[in-house]
Amino acid sequence: MSKLWGGRFTKETNKLVEEFTASITFDQHLAAEDIQGSLAHVQMLVESAIISAEDGEQIKAGLTKILAQLHAGLLEFDVAHEDIHMNVEKLLLAEIGPVGGKLHTGRSRNDQVATDMHLYLKNKISGLIALLVAVQNSIVTQAKNNLETIMPGYTHLQRAQPISFAHHLMAYFWMLQRDKERLHDSLARVDILPLGAGALAGTTFPIDRQRTAELLGFSQVYPNSMDAVSDRDFIIEFLSNASILMMHVSRLSEELIIWSSQEFQFVELDDSFCTGSSIMPQKKNPDVPELLRAKTGRVYGNLMGLLTVLKGLPLAYNKDMQEDKEGMFDTVKTVEGTLALLAPLLATMQVRTDKMAKATREDYSNATDIADYLSKKGLPFRDAHAVIGQIVLYAIKEQKYLLDLKLDEYQRFSTLFCDDIYEILQPLATVKSRNSYGGTAPAQITEQIKLAEQKLDARL
Ligand code: ARG
């Protein structure tokens, strides 16, 4: 099968080279975008009087037919035609004859492939934002149901201070909110058209790049043709945003795994989201969060891969850049799959309020509250901290928790202690008392959720 670029060659391409250099096995994912870009290009060529209206009509009819065949799953691609751009062009030539050769007037595969990638990502990022919102909604619903679900809060994975489970969950809402804002923000740099840059230097034809941009729904065109065909920042930015997002998902997954362990039993993942063991009949494994945690690795890998591909490239296009695609497709698929699972995983999760409450009763995480109590009675906080340290040491030795100590035991350490200490030490009271802005008190969380819902309603 003759190559579209075969004119200056005297030999057939080596078969191994043909396979090695071809991208059609993966860039066929861009078929719809490629045809969409060509339809706009040909329309612009006609409007700019670069090709005749009749030729334009024939080309558009051919492309439209090919698009319909694509949607019907009828298209067959050939590795001999290397990539999606030349495959589509070959199909067009077969469909309408030599007039199809006019489609490539005033453009190059270099600006064409970049355009396809911009169109693809623009569409995919919007889809990912919608999936992310579904996860945020699951979080808000769980949070609303668990405002007064008290659990130990941790630092260093050691019990620190009692918190509301809703507060813990909402922390992930805000991480995902930043991820969403980053994706939104990145759209400004995806929403820019490279087409019309030609191979690197522009074209001798009187093209109208603004018109092509308008037809394709881009709000800007690249002002520098060399930058237009060399830029892959928009993909790197996507991979980097996806990496941060997956890092958040991985942290949440880690907590779900810990919380659903026999040791914690804070949550119970729904049976439909867990799997069993082929040998140990009692097992219910949290495979989904484990895999979400692991898939973070491949997304980081895709980011590092592309950063490395680009770091030494001179301007303008180099074949190295063909390696930008698989990591991007893989990342889109991974993040789509991740978010689609995470929303129902969180929505169906059972919260073991009893286990959380028991854990909170059986620890010293209310120690700060007694320190605050003494310092509110006039003792400098640093001295109060030292006094409570001694009380905790004493309680551990006596094998008691802070609520079990008698008033006279407290008064041995400070005469400032009165009966009201027992009220202050109740887990729910400690949580309610952390009523500073953004704190864990249910009143604050209610405000926080209000703000979160405002963002969701305003599609921010
Ligand atoms: N398949 C190529 C890629 O993905 C398309 C651009 C090819 N351009 C070229 N000058 N060889 O990057």
Image (cartoon, rainbow, N blue to C red):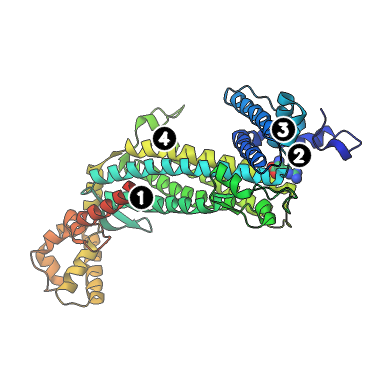
| The residue at label 2 has a CB less than 8 Å from ligand 1 | no
Residue 362 seen in this snapshot: no
Q: Are marks 1 and 4 in contact (CB under 8 Å)?
A: no
Disc 3 marks which residue?
89
Disc 4 marks which residue?
285
Q: Are marks 1 and 3 in contact (CB under 8 Å)?
A: no
Numbered-mark total: 4
SS under mark 1: helix
- Residue 319 lies left or right of residue 296; in this view the side is right
SS under mark 3: helix
Q: Residues within 10 Å of mark 3 (few under 14, many from 20)?
A: many
Where does residue 233 sit, x and y in percent of width and height? 60, 54
Where does residue 334 sit, x and y in percent of width and height? 52, 40
Residue 168 seen in this snapshot: yes
Q: Residues within 10 Å of mark 4 (few under 14, many from 20)?
A: some
Residue 173's mark?
1
- Residue 57 lies left or right of residue 220; in this view the side is right
- Residue 23 lies left or right of residue 120; in this view the side is right
* Mark closer to the chain start, 4 or 2: 2
SS under mark 2: helix
Q: Residues within 10 Å of mark 1 (few under 14, many from 20)?
A: many
Q: Nearer the viewer, residue 188 or 28?
A: 188
Mark pair 4, 2: CA separation: 43 Å
Disc 2 marks which residue?
21
